[in-house]
């Protein structure tokens, strides 16, 4: 049967394509995963950002996969997702706590025992033929992830050239909230909370959770990684700078 001309082919929407494509992030064939990443980069960002929760599930599954090459490919998919819409990646349900836990697991930064005398050879992500490069890439992805979740949002530029003065001071405080369920922190309905599955849409919430669970481990791990020097040391310095900036923003 003759194939229809290119113009006559039906273009499927992203909402139909993604459920079929995402399982390929765990495909055992490296060529399939490389082509998948190329295809993902070609998709419209506006159509992808609403599917970040599903995408995050496969990224986390890839980062904990037994096959080292699949773990490395999952890092690249995470990098693409952060470039596409970092805010959705860190604020979707499970996107903040679960992803951070798995990233720290791949680096073996989970507890005091693994952090004591840490070297790159302990990192699960580093058990590949590329070795140090994979560890450095994981550190860079962790830095990008933390920057997306902890960095202060940029103030919109005043393009009108008119100075904003009274009575328009702090006008954002009087606007309708931009986030869904803006008053969830009041716990009005007494819903039981699952810290790992929760969607942290607010930067301050993400900072509180990060400080309570992960901050000390990341500090110690990044300090140990800096001593490794080379690519790993440079990535660790970038991570430490982000931690310093986040600490300054909280004060």
Image (cartoon, grey):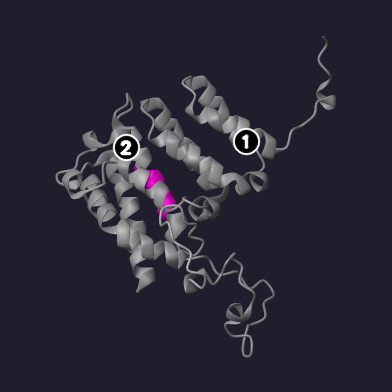
Q: Is residue 160 above or below residue 46?
A: below
Give the side of residue 219 with respect to residue 60, left or right. Answer: left
Which mark is drawn over residue 135?
A: 2
User: Sequence-wise, which precedes: disc 2 or disc 1?
Assistant: 1
Q: Is residue 65 above or below residue 104?
A: above
The answer to whether the residues at label 2 and label 1 have Cβ atoms under 8 Å apart is no
Query: Does the rendering let one see residue 37?
Result: no
Badge 1 local density, few (<14 within 10 Å), some, or many (20+)?
A: some
Q: Secondary structure at mark 2?
A: helix
Q: Residue furthest top?
A: 1
Q: Which residues are magenta?
A: 139-146
Which mark is drawn over residue 111?
A: none
Q: Secondary structure at mark 1?
A: helix
**Which quadrant of the structure image shows residue 147?**
bottom left
Task: Please say whether residue 143 is one of the residues in the magenta stretch.
Answer: yes
Q: Position of residue 49 (x, y in %)?
A: 61, 48
Indicate the quadrant containing the N terminus: top left, top right, bottom left or bottom right: top right
Q: Residue furthest bottom?
A: 166
Front tag of 2 and 1: 1
The residue tagged 1 is: 18
Is the stretch drawn in magenta largely helix, strand or loop?
helix
Give the side of residue 113 with respect to residue 88, left or right. Answer: left
Q: Position of residue 235 (x, y in %)?
A: 33, 45
Q: Mark 2 and mark 1: span between their CA atoms? A: 29 Å
Task: Please say whether residue 94 is one of the residues in the magenta stretch.
Answer: no
Q: For the point 43% across and 33% down, which residue is it?
A: 62
Query: Does the rendering let one see residue 180?
Result: yes
Q: Is residue 19 above or below residue 154?
A: above
Q: Nearer the viewer, residue 28 or 118?
A: 28
Q: Position of residue 59 (x, y in %)?
A: 47, 38
Badge 2 local density, few (<14 within 10 Å), some, or many (20+)?
A: many
Q: For the point 35% across and 51% down, which residue is it?
A: 238
């Amino acid at each position: 049967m003759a194939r229809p001309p290119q113009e006559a082919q039906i273009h499927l929407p992203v909402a139909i394509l993604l459920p079929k494509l995402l399982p390929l992030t765990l495909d055992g064939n490296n060529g399939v995963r490389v082509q998948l990443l190329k295809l993902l980069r070609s998709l419209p960002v506006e159509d992808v950002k609403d599917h970040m929760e599903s995408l995050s599930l496969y990224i986390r599954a890839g980062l904990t996969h037994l096959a080292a090459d699949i773990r490395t490919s999952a890092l690249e998919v995470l990098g693409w997702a952060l470039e596409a819409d970092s805010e959705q990646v860190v604020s979707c349900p499970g996107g903040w706590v679960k992803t951070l836990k798995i990233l720290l697991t791949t680096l073996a930064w989970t507890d005091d025992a693994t952090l004591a005398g840490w070297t790159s050879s302990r990192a699960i992500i580093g058990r590949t033929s590329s070795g140090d490069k994979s560890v450095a890439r994981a550190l860079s992805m962790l830095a990008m992830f933390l920057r997306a979740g902890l960095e202060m949002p940029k103030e919109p530029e005043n393009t009108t050239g008119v100075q904003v003065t009274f009575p328009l001071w702090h006008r954002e405080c009087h606007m309708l909230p931009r986030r869904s369920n803006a008053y969830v922190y009041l716990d009005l309905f007494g819903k039981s909370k699952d810290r790992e599955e929760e969607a942290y849409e607010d930067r301050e919430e993400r900072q509180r959770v990060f400080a309570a669970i992960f901050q000390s481990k990341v500090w110690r791990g990044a300090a140990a990684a800096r001593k490794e020097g080379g690519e790993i040391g440079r990535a660790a310095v970038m991570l430490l700078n982000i931690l310093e900036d986040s600490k300054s923003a909280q004060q």
